[in-house]
Image (cartoon, rainbow, N blue to C red):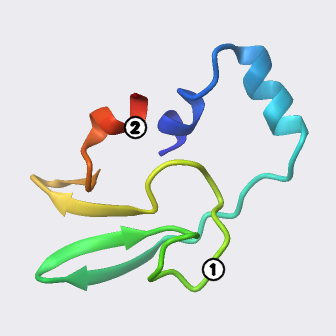
Amino acid sequence: MSLAHLARHASVASVLAAARSQRPPLILPEPFDHEGVRVICYPGDAMHPVRERALPGPTRLHYRDRRFTPEEGFDALFD
């Protein structure tokens, strides 16, 4: 998810400027099972106790094919 976040920036200078403008986000993943599938949700997801998003991107990853992936797939992260 960190790489998906960094991919939104066009340059290192942009990343550094964004990092200087805010406190580091606190990521508190919450695991749960949904219809027999292991899921991890992040702040901002309806199933997470913290309502405010910590990072852009998907708020929920599903365990499929031995890895956690966004519902929309990885390609959707970089569009």
Q: Earlier in the sequence, mark 1 or mark 2?
A: 1
Name the amino acid, label 2: Leu
Find numbered disc 2 in the image and state the secondary structure of the residue it sits on. Answer: helix
Quarter of the image with the C terminus in it? top left
Find numbered disc 1 in the image and state the secondary structure of the residue it sits on. Answer: loop
Q: Against 63, is 45 above or below?
A: below
Which residue corresponds to mark 2?
A: 77
**Residue 66 locus on image (x, y percent):** 14, 54
The label shown at residue 50 is: 1
Instruction: Tell me the quarter of the picture where residue 49 sits.
Output: bottom right
Q: Against 75, is 22 above or below?
A: below
Compared across the picture, whether 22 is left or right of 25 comes to right
Residue extending farthest to the front is 79
Name the amino acid, label 1: Val
Q: Residue at x 85, y 28 (%)?
A: 17
Estimate how packed mark 1 is, as few (under 14), some (14 to 19) or many (20 or more) residues with alpha carbons within 10 Å: some
